[in-house]
Amino acid sequence: MMPIDPLTTLLRRWSHDPAITPGFSAGVWARIDAARRDQRIVIAFRWALPLAASVALLLGMGAARAEVKRDHTELMAAYYVRTIDPVQITGHAEHHP
Amino acid sequence: MKRCALLLVVVLAIGAASYALTRLLWPAPAPSEDQMAWLKREFALSPTQATAIEKLQYDYMPVCSDHCAQIVDARERLAAKPDDPQLRADILRLERVCSDATLQHVREIAALMDSDQGRRFLKLVEPKISRHGHQGPFDLK
């Protein structure tokens, strides 16, 4: 007959009854909700980046096109006036009415 | 916050790059475009308006040529007598008359356009017409 190990006896008798922490359940749900919110932010960011990039692309192109057109209009208007304004015509020694 | 900053940087970089590339690669319209074609396109002229403006331009040509000839003649006379104050005053008066005639001409053209387009046309061309009202007659007292 084997002698009974006192440690084994002690372990068999041992039981753990943790005291319930106040607000434990609420804390768990709060952490779950926070994780869900983080996930929503990540998903929103994934959409926001291509959307904002597309808008920036279109705005950049649009601004450049508008500026090219404005420059051309100014250039043509100046050229037009130079052909009908005698003071400028004689100053520039050219005449193209 | 970090994500927002990153988003902003990316968006600004894309916007700036698309602007620069468009300016670099998109061809500008030819500056030698026919003036009547430009007027028609820029100010959305109807065929009737275009015809009327073309006629006005045609009628203004001899007036413009006459003014040019008078200015050239006066400048030649001044070149022969550079110290003659009367000739200088004559040139200024002549240039003022020519500028007024040009202003009158562009206003007549604008009157033939739709009102919004006419206003835009005047806003664009009037500041480019030489004006001499603010100048004194050189060094005359």
Image: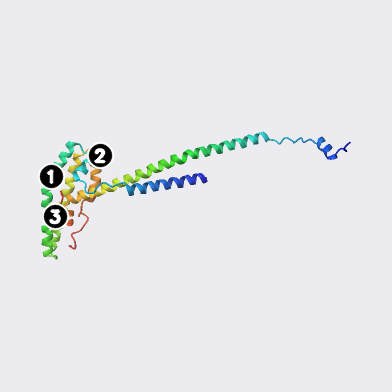
Residue at left 33%, top 49%?
B24
Q: Nearer the viewer, mark 3 or mark 2?
A: 2
Q: Position of residue A64 (x, y in %)?
A: 34, 46
Judging by the rendered image, the residue that carries numbered circle 2 is B116
Q: Chain of mark 1?
A: B
Front one among B129 and A60: A60
Q: In the visual, does B81 lie left or right of A61?
A: left
Q: Earlier in the sequence, mark 1 or mark 2?
A: 1
Q: Is residue B82 above or below residue B132?
A: below
Q: Earlier in the sequence, mark 3 or mark 1?
A: 1
Which part of the image, by quadrant, shows the C terminus of chain B? bottom left
Give the structural element (helix, strand or loop) at label 2.
Answer: helix
Front one among A45 and B138: A45
Residue at left 57%, top 36%?
A36
Q: Chain of mark 2?
A: B
Q: Quadrant of residue A13?
A: top right
Residue B58: numbered disc: 1
Residue B94: numbered disc: 3
